[in-house]
Image: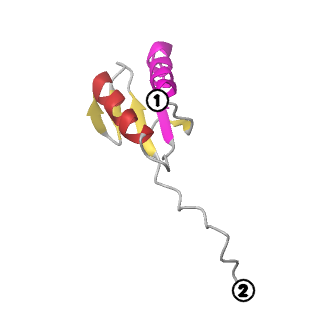
Amino acid sequence: QPNPNVVNPPNPLDPIHLKIDQAGAFYWNDTPVDELGLKAQLAVIAQQSNQPEIQIAADDGVAYQYGARVLADAKSYNLTKIGFTEAD
C-alpha cells in the first residue's frame, strides 16, 4: 500500500534555454532579450518554489565576460540550477 505520508516530488520543469551568440546577445528560449530583460526573467524564476534549470549555450568564440555576467546575475538571485550545453 502507498504510504500516505510520502510526498511525491513535483515533475521536473522544462529547462530554460539561454543562448549567447558571438556578439554577446542573449536569447531566452529563442526570444531575444537584453540584459535588463534577462535579469527580469531571472527574477521571475527566483520567485518560484520549484525552479527550472537554466541551460546556457554559448556560441564558439563568445567572450568570457558574457557567460560570467549571466552566472553573476543568476547568483545574485540565488539561482542554483544552472548547466551548460553545446550551442546549436
Secondary structure of the residue carrying tag 1 is: loop
Q: Which residue is mark 1?
A: 77
Instruction: Please say if 34 is above or below 27.
Output: above
* Residue stretch rendered in magenta on the structure: 54-76
Residue shown at 27% from the left, 33% from the top? 32
Q: Which residue is mark 2?
A: 1
Confirm whether the magenta stretch covers residue 1.
no
| Residue 31 image position (x, y, % from top left) | 28, 39
Relative placement, left or right, of 27 versus 3 is left
Q: Nearer the viewer, residue 70 or 46?
A: 46
User: Would you call the spot at circle 1 few (<14 residues within 10 Å), some (14-19), or many (20 or more)?
Assistant: some
Instruction: Please say if 22 is above or below 88.
Output: above
- Identity of the amino acid at label 2? Gln
* Cα distance between the residues tagged 1 and 2: 41 Å
Where is residue 37, by image quadrant?
A: top left
User: Would you call the spot at circle 2 few (<14 residues within 10 Å), some (14-19), or many (20 or more)?
Assistant: few
